[in-house]
């Protein structure tokens, strides 16, 4: 075995977006606050017939070979906007995609961090049993109170990754730095569909977690920042990466001298157009970096920082495989983003905020373009449909 890591990656985001140019008009503020100060241009908006399950199934579908369907040993579904308090969202995906019955399926939650726990546990499973492949999925809808400071950072999307031995894209290094602390910076009680947030505190805890996780990574023998070529941060909004880069540079001192803002710029392209995707955000950023970076990243080292409010932070590193470009889905991702439709303010509000309660039975008219969609709720059961 020559290492374990990400063998394949695919992202999905809804067909519809709301422009932040329209949101600044609605909020009556200077456009540069959202476009420059927050660093966002569009937010992906799911139509009523899309949820974290259908987005996840749509992210997984392109990478599902017959061999993967038959051999996947574990499915880890990371989300903080799940649809059931008991059943794992992964089981709906398992059924929709016809995965083999002899695998374990579980849902992970720790705000925006949980996909990283999924990746690290998946990597350890594969290190123990190198023939196994693990599917790690992250899918979220970021929703704040209407008119709140968080509204401009909303978004929706999913990412699916295959973790295997001899990966074709990225080999994960075994060292990672951790930091956990019990704090109320962002949370969502069970009865709420929108998040509660102490915005300024959340930024402070994010940056403290980065400095602490970085120190832990170095204490455990991790690489100096001088050996890292690119950086990819959890991005609730792209301006956060600028703050994170400044904090990491300060923590790493002279080791950061060779790096400037270009080392994370390509990781921001997808997030700026999609918005926050919570658990998926870091990995959509990673996909953006791999897909869109003009340089050949083969053999280069990427540093990744994962953050989930509440709070857990993890800093880890990975090496890009030499032939990685042959295995990317960059064109499909570009086509998906380029073909989206702009929503007017009325439809955005109706879909994001005024949708009827999902506690009642209803049939959803088809609005989504994905291969899988939420078709109805019947007797408290969610019924998904595959496009014919
Ligand atoms: N032109 C250019 N820049 C402008 C501007 C203008 N006209 N007007 C304001 N700005 C700048 C401000 O100077 C500020 O820049 P700095 O941060 O560099 O100082 C930036 O725009 C934002 O302005 P405010 O601080 O006034 O913004 P705000 O208070 O209205 O809200 C926020 C910002 C707190 C991040 C809010 O959007 C929020 O609560 N978001 C949700 C929480 C969040 O994303 N937290 C991030 C860390 S937690 C995390 O990462 C987990 C997660 O995914 C949620």
Image (tube, helix red, strand yellow):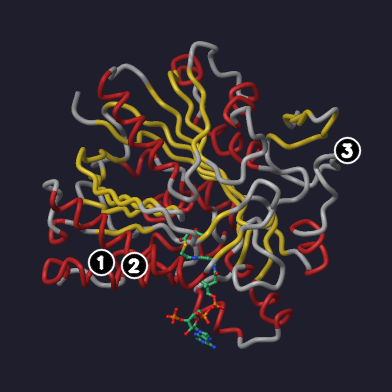
Q: Position of residue 144 (x, y in %)?
A: 65, 62
Q: Quadrant of residue 326?
A: top left
Residue 232 picture quarter: bottom left
Mark 3 touching mark 1, by CB under 8 A? no
Q: Is residue 237 above or below residue 136?
A: below
Q: Is residue 380 left or right of residue 107?
A: right
Badge 1 crowding class, 10 Å Cα cut-off, few under 14, some 14 to 19, many 20 or more, is many
Residue under label 2, please give it: 244
Q: Measured from the top left, where is residue 102 in percent x and y?
A: 49, 11
Q: Report which residue position mark 1 lands on.
A: 248
Q: Which residue is mark 3?
A: 362
> Which residue is found at the position 46% from the left and 48% from the top?
330
Residue at image location 19% in from the left, 23% down from the top: 1
Q: Nearer the viewer, residue 82 or 370?
A: 82
Among the 4 quarters of the image, the one containing residue 295: bottom left
Residue 167 placement (x, y as % from top left)? 30, 32
| Marks 1 and 2, how far apart at CA | 6 Å
Give the crowd class for mark 2: few <14, some 14-19, many >=20 residues within 10 Å: many
């Amino acid at each position: 075995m020559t290492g374990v890591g990400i063998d394949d990656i695919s992202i999905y985001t809804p067909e519809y977006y709301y422009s932040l140019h329209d949101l600044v008009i609605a909020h009556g503020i200077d456009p540069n606050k959202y476009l420059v100060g927050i660093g966002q241009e569009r937010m992906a908006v799911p139509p009523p017939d899309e949820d974290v399950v259908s987005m996840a199934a749509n992210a997984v579908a392109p990478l599902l070979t017959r061999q993967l369907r038959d051999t996947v040993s574990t499915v880890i579904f990371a989300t903080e906007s799940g649809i059931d308090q008991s059943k794992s969202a992964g089981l709906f995906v398992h059924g929709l995609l016809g995965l083999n019955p002899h695998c374990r399926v579980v849902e992970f939650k720790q705000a925006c961090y949980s996909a990283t726990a999924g990746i690290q546990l998946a990597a350890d499973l594969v290190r123990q049993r190198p023939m196994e492949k693990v599917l790690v999925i992250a899918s979220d809808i970021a929703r704040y109170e209407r008119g709140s400071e968080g509204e401009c950072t909303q978004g929706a999307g999913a990412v699916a990754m295959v973790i295997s031995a001899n990966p074709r894209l990225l080999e994960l290094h075994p060292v990672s730095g951790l930091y956990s602390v019990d704090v109320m910076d962002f949370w969502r009680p069970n009865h709420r569909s929108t998040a509660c947030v102490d915005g300024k505190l959340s930024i402070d805890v994010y940056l403290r977690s980065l400095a602490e996780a970085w120190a832990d990574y170095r204490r455990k023998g991790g690489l100096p920042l001088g050996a890292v070529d690119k950086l990819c941060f959890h991005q609730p909004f792209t301006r956060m990466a600028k703050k994170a880069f400044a904090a990491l540079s300060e923590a790493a001192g002279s080791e950061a001298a060779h790096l400037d803002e270009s080392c994370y710029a390509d990781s921001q392209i997808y997030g700026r157009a999609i918005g926050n995707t919570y658990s998926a955000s870091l990995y959509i950023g990673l996909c953006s970096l791999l897909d869109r970076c003009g340089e050949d990243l083969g053999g280069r080292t990427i540093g990744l920082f994962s953050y989930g409010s509440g709070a857990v932070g993890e800093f880890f590193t990975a090496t890009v495989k030499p032939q990685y470009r042959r295995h990317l889905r960059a064109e499909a991702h570009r086509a998906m983003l380029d073909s989206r439709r702009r929503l007017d303010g009325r439809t955005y509000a109706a879909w994001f905020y005024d949708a009827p309660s999902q506690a009642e039975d209803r049939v959803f008219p088809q609005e989504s373009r994905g291969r899988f969609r939420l078709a109805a709720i019947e007797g408290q059961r969610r019924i998904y449909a595959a496009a014919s």
